[in-house]
Image: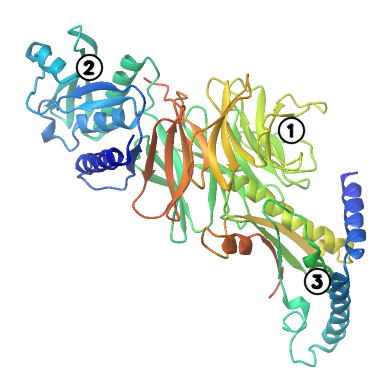
């Protein structure tokens, strides 16, 4: 993509997002650089009567699809069909749209609204998917993300992740906030705020709890907080440092890093803090554990070989368990996170003074660098494996960024003020 | 067993250190004379200079930071004398206690840096306990990259942040 076009494209994204976000609120800006090879041309016609709602449904749907990097939005200006019978397919074919989204919103008494939507195949002149749903006016964005997921899944064959949430730490002045937001950065709210650092948020597999490390007691302690009740408990508060929580796939156990017996070593505890078991025994640093999706192994960072590298160890707690080294390129490979199919892992690789997001295939050992920025940290796979969320830095400020698994599409997400870091992409929600 | 191995390594390192070039030896000799003064000064309550030995700008004990290379927790020869001087002060003043705070620059992983900071604090603690300080006098903790002293993305800021601070309790 030429610089000129990129600038124009970037300007368009900013403008369209600015327009989409007129009701100001705490949110993340999204900027897209580059684009996928083959983007699906799709026209999204504003739904009937949605202008009367606080939030236009199609604005959210369009931003979601565009952010994925897999779609090219076709301008629908001049034609406003809301029913299949009103669609002139040849007109959309002339505009090079291969898919068309139409729908309507019907205000109902009691603060509710009915939303009808249809996804149409322009070439075949048929309906590919549709939905009619009644939602409270407070849930318009939720409904829009669901529609975007249906469109994404129908047209790409992959699981949509627009309805998922992300967690990250926001530093503003001397205040640290652990925040949760929708996958598009909206509806951000703090679940805990302190004047001491917070690091390493980790979602429970059911998305109901978050484990994190807080320095509020002047040293790192691991807490688990239930999102619905805000109830929180220190689950690892042993002598020394307690950090790097990781959930087992069944949500029953946590791997944590303790300096309890000297050094930094990996231990297993039950999610309520009971049943301490030591997992690694090395004379070096062992940290950043991450469970394989089948729960049988943990990958982690260790400097036992002289430089920090990624290793894998079986979770069966036996003295004979041997760690296997996985990374060999370079002298600094850290922060591993398994893909949800267990076939690869993402991590931070240092080379030429840069710290970048990389992915390694477990079967072949092949490494692919996905970013070329200066200081990337904390990569975290989206639940569909399509994107990787990570922290990076622009002009001295920490921001969130997402990169597609193939490295083709990158997007920046950033709040207006403050430093943002330690992102973690939440799991798919069960009810769908 | 691990501890024994650690002690052996430290002894070997000490042996290496004492066999290095002249300037280091000179520096260590001057340190020892400084300590002698410090100990006698502390017995008197304050030194001839009017400073408590820990704060006397002329004493090595007024220096409180030990710096490290990137991704390293090895105390270089340049700073061994400083660690040893504080160890000898702790040995001669059993009531004194220190907190060693390990820090890192802000590049790379926060969790790895937290562990690295702990290592940097522990390395200094090892030298101090081998040089006469009692383990109970020393607590080693890590701040990782969370409490930078210098801000900025350049070598001078990074260098300033890769350090262990020696903080006396009650100061």
C-beta proximity under 8 Å, tags 3 and 1: no
Q: Which of the chains bears the disc numbered 2?
A: A
Camera-near label (3 vs 1) is 3
Q: Is residue A176 left or right of residue B134?
A: left
Provide the residue designation for mark 2: A99
* Of callouts 1 and 2, the N-terminal one: 2
SS state under label 1: loop
The residue located at (68%, 29%) in the rendering is A326
One can see residue A128 in this view: yes
SS state under label 3: helix
C-beta proximity under 8 Å, tags 2 and 3: no
Spatial CA span between label 3 and label 1: 36 Å
Looking at the rendered structure, which numbered label has been put on residue A279? 1
Looking at the rendered structure, which numbered label has been put on residue B86? 3
Q: Establish if A401 lies above or below A122.
A: below
Image quadrant for the N terminus of chain A?
A: top left
Camera-near label (2 vs 3) is 2
Q: Position of residue B122 (x, y in %)?
A: 77, 55
Q: Are marks 1 and 2 on the same chain?
A: yes
Q: Position of residue A84 (x, y in %)?
A: 12, 12
Spatial CA span between label 1 and label 2: 52 Å
SS state under label 2: strand
Q: Nearer the viewer, residue A94 or A336?
A: A94
Spatial CA span between label 2 and label 3: 73 Å
Q: Which of the chains bears the disc numbered 3?
A: B
Q: What number of labels is visible?
A: 3
Report crowding for label 2: few under 14, some 14 to 19, many 20 or more residues within 10 A (C-alpha). Answer: many
Q: Quadrant of residue B64?
A: bottom right
């Amino acid at each position: 993509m030429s610089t000129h076009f990129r600038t124009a494209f970037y300007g368009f994204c900013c403008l369209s997002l600015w327009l989409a976000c007129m009701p100001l609120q705490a949110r993340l800006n999204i900027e897209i650089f580059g684009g996928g090879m083959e983007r699906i041309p799709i026209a999204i016609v504003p739904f009937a009567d949605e202008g009367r709602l606080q939030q236009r449904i199609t604005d959210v749907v369009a931003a979601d699809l565009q952010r994925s990097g897999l779609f090219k939005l076709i301008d629908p200006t001049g034609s406003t069909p809301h029913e299949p019978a009103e669609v002139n397919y040849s007109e959309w074919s002339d505009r090079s749209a291969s898919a068309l989204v139409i729908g309507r919103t019907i205000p109902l008494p009691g603060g509710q609204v009915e939303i009808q939507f249809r996804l149409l195949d322009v070439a075949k002149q048929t309906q590919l998917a549709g939905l009619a749903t009644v939602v409270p006016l407070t849930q318009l964005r939720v409904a829009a993300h669901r529609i975007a997921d249906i469109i994404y899944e129908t047209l790409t064959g992959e699981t949509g992740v627009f309805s998922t949430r992300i967690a990250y730490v926001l530093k503003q002045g001397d205040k640290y906030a652990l925040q949760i937001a929708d996958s598009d950065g909206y509806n951000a709210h703090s679940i805990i705020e302190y004047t001491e650092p917070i690091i390493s948020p980790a979602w429970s597999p059911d998305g109901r709890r978050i484990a994190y490390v807080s320095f509020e007691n002047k040293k790192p302690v691991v807490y688990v907080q239930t999102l619905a009740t805000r109830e929180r408990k220190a689950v690892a508060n042993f002598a020394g440092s307690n950090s790097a929580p990781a959930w087992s796939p069944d949500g029953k156990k946590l791997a944590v890093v303790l300096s309890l017996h000297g050094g930094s070593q990996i231990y297993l505890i039950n999610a309520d803090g009971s049943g301490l078991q030591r997992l690694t025994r090395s004379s070096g640093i062992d940290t950043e554990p991450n469970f394989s999706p089948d729960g049988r192994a943990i990958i982690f960072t260790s400097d036992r070989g002289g430089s920090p590298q990624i290793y894998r160890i079986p979770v069966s707690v036996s003295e004979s368990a041997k760690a296997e080294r996985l990374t060999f390129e370079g002298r600094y490979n850290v922060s591993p996170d398994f893909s949800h199919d267990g076939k690869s892992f993402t991590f931070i690789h240092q080379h030429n003074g840069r710290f970048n997001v990389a992915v390694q295939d477990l079967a072949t050992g092949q490494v692919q660098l996905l970013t070329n920025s200066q200081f990337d940290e904390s990569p975290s796979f989206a639940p569909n494996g399509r994107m990787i969320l990570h922290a990076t830095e622009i002009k001295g400020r920490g921001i969130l960024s997402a990169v597609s698994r193939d490295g083709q599409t990158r997007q920046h997400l950033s709040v207006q003020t403050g430093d943002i870091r330690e992102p973690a992409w939440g799991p798919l929600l069960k009810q769908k | 067993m691990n501890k024994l191995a650690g002690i052996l390594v430290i002894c070997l390192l000490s042996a290496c250190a004492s066999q290095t070039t002249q300037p280091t030896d000179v520096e260590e000799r001057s340190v020892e004379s400084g300590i002698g003064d410090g100990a006698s000064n502390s017995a008197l309550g304050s030194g001839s200079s009017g400073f408590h030995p820990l704060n006397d700008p002329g004493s090595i004990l007024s220096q409180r930071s030990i710096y490290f290379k990137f991704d390293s927790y090895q105390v270089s020869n340049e700073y061994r004398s400083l660690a040893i001087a504080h160890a000898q002060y702790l040995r001669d003043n059993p009531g004194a206690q220190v907190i060693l705070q390990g820090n890192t620059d802000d590049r790379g992983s926060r969790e790895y840096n937290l562990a690295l900071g702990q290592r940097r604090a522990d390395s200094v603690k090892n030298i101090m306990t081998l040089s006469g300080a009692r383990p109970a006098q020393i607590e080693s903790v890590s701040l990782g990259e969370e409490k930078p002293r210098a801000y900025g993305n350049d070598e001078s800021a990074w260098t300033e942040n890769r350090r262990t601070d020696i903080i006396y309790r009650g100061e």
